[in-house]
Amino acid sequence: MQRRRDERIMSMEKKMTIKEIAKLSGVSPTAVSFVLNGKNGVSELTRQKVLSVIEMTNFVPNAASKRLTMKKSFNVALIYPVSASPFTDMFYCEIAAGLTEYLTENKYNVVFVPIKAPSLTEVPDIIKIQDADGAIFLQGVDKLLLDKLDEMDFPYIFIDIHENDTKKIHVSLDSEKLVYEAARYFISHGHEKLAFLGSDWLPGYYIRCFNGYQKALGESGLGIMPGWIQTGANDEEGVYRCMERILSSPDMPTAVCCMSDMQAIQGIRYCQEKGFHVPEDLSFIGIDDIVLSRYTTPPLTTLTYDKPGMGKLAGELLLKKIDGEERNSHIITEFGVAERKSVMDLRNGRSTS
């Protein structure tokens, strides 16, 4: 008889639904959902009733019924251009890792959604079919797409945006200060001839970075040679062309300030292929501290900050927005220097690490 009773209980556990838990508890299905998701809106007495029934029945909520009751998909779309894929770009990989960790802790799934021409103005399918509660964009996106999302009243925020639109909620870096600090690091170690290696593929980002470079040199009364400013470093081939022009300058610089670690790493390799020594002949600094920068020859000196933390902060801002709470954008302004071996200290003739 005991065995048959246990079998009946096991059968009940397998078939139990949120509605049945609500019936046994004497409360509404919504109240059960609030308890399951740790939400406010129910009394402590109700919460204990529901938890007692859940414990007694070993209830595990069905994902589909949970979605229907809460009217949520518990998915967040991470939308990015193919050029900024977190699967190939080490900078965005670390940000996506922090975002995924935070959302997973808060019972949300991350759905990776690449977009490319001619789909840059189209609402992604995951949003059309209402299978995402919100979206996070890496970098900017076409205004036509945002207009459509605004019409749908769909929550979204940005990571690493390079526009001056203060209405867009985002988590970004103070890129002007980043490059300013990088240039100041060179100057503090005796460098007075600083080249600038970057890309104007994202104009807003380029302008901010170049402003930081100019500001640092201007404060120190240092001049800039036209051949030292190179803006075509969009890929490895572009970096090589830019470095060729820098190295053939009549007055060669002693250091190169780069808009990204990858540009610095590729620049170092070009110099070595041409017989130059880094940092003895030319010093390099980046501004991302991607994992690869630790393992180059020589290891790359670079600006460092909490990239996973950027992802976590973006996840927090989006979940607040999904719940109807508005939050302000957050711009990262605190940076450190990961001192390695790609910078020569001209004051003593040794690398800075």
Image (tube, rainbow, N blue to C red):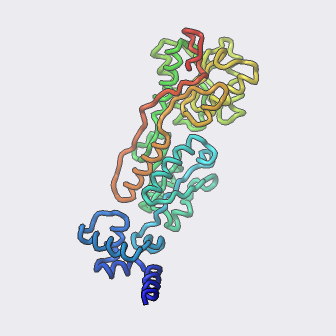
Percent of width and height locating residue 224: 57, 16
Quarter that holds the N terminus: bottom left
Q: Residue at x 48, y 24 (%)?
A: 181
Residue 119, compared with residue 228, is above or below; it is below
For image coordinates 42% across by 87% down, the residue present is 2
- Evaluate whether residue 42 shows in this view: yes
Q: Is residue 279 left or right of residue 34?
A: right
* Image spot of residue 68 (x, y percent): 43, 73
Residue 316's place in the image compared with 211, above or below, is below
Outermost residue toward the bottom in this view: 1
Depth check: 256 or 108 in front? 108
Residue 211 appears anywhere in the view? no
Horizontal side, residue 321 vs residue 234: left or right = left
Q: Position of residue 57 (x, y in %)?
A: 39, 77
Q: Residue at x 51, y 50 (%)?
A: 137
Dividing the picture into quarters, in which one does residue 284 lie? top right
In the rendering, at what x and y percent does residue 345 appear?
56, 14
Point out the residue furthest to the right here. Answer: 274
The C terminus: image quadrant: top right
Q: How many marks?
A: 0
- The residue at 62%/45% (across/down) is 83
Residue 68, compared with residue 298, is above or below; it is: below
As drawn, is 69 to the left or to the right of 185? left
- Closer to us: 352 or 332: 352
Extreme residue in the top direction: 348
> Which image quarter: residue 230?
top right
